[in-house]
Amino acid sequence: MNNPAKFTTSQIRADFLEFFKSKGHTIVPSAPLVPGNDPTLLFTNSGMVQFKDVFLGAEKRSYVRAADVQRCLRAGGKHNDLDSVGYTARHHTFFEMLGNWSFGDYFKKEAIAWSWELLTKVWGLAPERLLVTVYHTDDESYELWNKMIGLPPERIVRIGDNKGAPYASDNFWQMADTGPCGPCTEIFYDHGEHIAGGPPGSPDEDGDRYIEIWNNVFMQFDRQPDGTLVPLPAPCVDTGMGLERLAAILQHVHTNYEIDLFQALIRKASELTGMADLENKSLRVIADHIRACSFLIVDGVLPSNEGRGYVLRRIIRRALRHGWMLGVRQPFFSKLVPTLVEQMGEAYPELPAQADTVVRALQAEEERFAETLDSGMKIFDDLAAKVTDGVIPGVDAFRLYDTYGFPVDLTADIARERGMTVDMEGFEARWSTSAKPRGLPASSAVA
């Protein structure tokens, strides 16, 4: 088995890029979190966003093979993991996606062979710990895994359609209702029998035993309006591997928050808040949120009451509220920036270049919210004490938002920790009749 001390997060990034550089790939820098080529997206939420026009044939690049480490954000719109951060082992607002790409060059054989080589030869993962899924009609991928790689049939899972709906499957990817699409093959790591959960495709697949680490998408069809699949003249490869999940495996820990990068941030948050328990949920939330907030500011987003700026404000205020829960009454969040620069500045030089801007923006927001946080929490406590059915009335949630600047998802987060819920329909009804600021979203469903 591999040596966990060797595989720092920084080393894993470097290994990945060096490996694919040796396979003739051009190393491409991460795109910003604000998409430059897709107005329908709030944030860059996957590695393929910056290559979307290439896959659609609207753009030509000077290379046909690429590899990158893409910073991603899922904290608004259709892709929103914000409410899960702090409650699960692997959800983040900000995460990094390792990807290798072929634009009409190599296809399934090379992609599968190289993924296996990198995982088992370079990083030394035990082959018997790995199993894969393929789309149920993708016999080509099945044969490559079975005959070329040598995986036994019991470790190759065919994943079919979702209740018979055409192409509605985790193992068939499509960009939209029409256009480029194709089957996927996913690689899973088996943490062992001592962890609850079953293999993909089983009733217990949502357990923590089998964790997906790498997805290879083979775009080989152009889906027509009538559903017909027409073979693409130049099939492409689009892959994605979560850096944080991979680091947890290579460093022999079970949750993403135990990897070196997060531990450095958590230790600094512990120092700033006085919370000695490094497994404390609030420390994990703070460590996650400083990455998202800092990189949003680096990419030109500032706190505001509209769109992306509002999402940033929500994330900052959620982090500050978790600091408040730990007894912090002074600005602390911006003091995590130097530690973040130490951990990620080499991979993303734009971060240290704009560190002062990040600190100033976070400090201003901390000062803005400090007084209202304390007052708002007292109001929430009073409201919660009067609740008899476990539901915070929507009109009261609106008052917290309208008077104290509490986004309703923050109120819902606090309520959930106390075993309560928020009457969201009542909140929305009150919000819709108010003199609301233009563009201010009512809830976490930012479009």
Image (tube, rainbow, N blue to C red):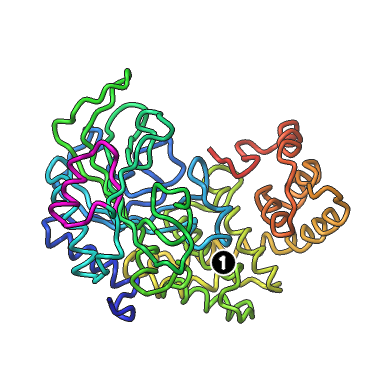
> Where does the image place residue 44, in percent across and percent down from the top left?
40, 47
Residue nearest the observer in this picture, 309 or 425:
425
Secondary-structure class at tag 1: helix
Q: Is residue 235 left or right of residue 430?
A: left
Q: Which residues are magenta?
A: 132-153
Q: Is residue 136 magenta?
A: yes
Q: Residue at x 23, y 39 (%)?
A: 138
The quarter holding residue 344 reads: bottom left
Is 282 located above or below residue 176 in the figure? below
Residue nearest the observer in this picture, 414 or 416:
416
* Placement of the N terminus among the 4 image quadrants: bottom left
Q: Is residue 361 magenta?
A: no
Q: Is residue 278 left or right of residue 395?
A: left
Residue beneath disc 1: 286
The quarter holding residue 441 reads: top right
Residue nearest the observer in this picture, 132 or 338:
132
Q: Residue at x 36, y 74 (%)?
A: 251
- Report crowding for label 1: few under 14, some 14 to 19, many 20 or more residues within 10 A (C-alpha): many
> Where does the image place residue 126, in percent across and percent down from the top left?
26, 69
Is 52 located above or below residue 71 in the figure? above
> Where does the image place residue 371, in percent across and percent down from the top left?
74, 63
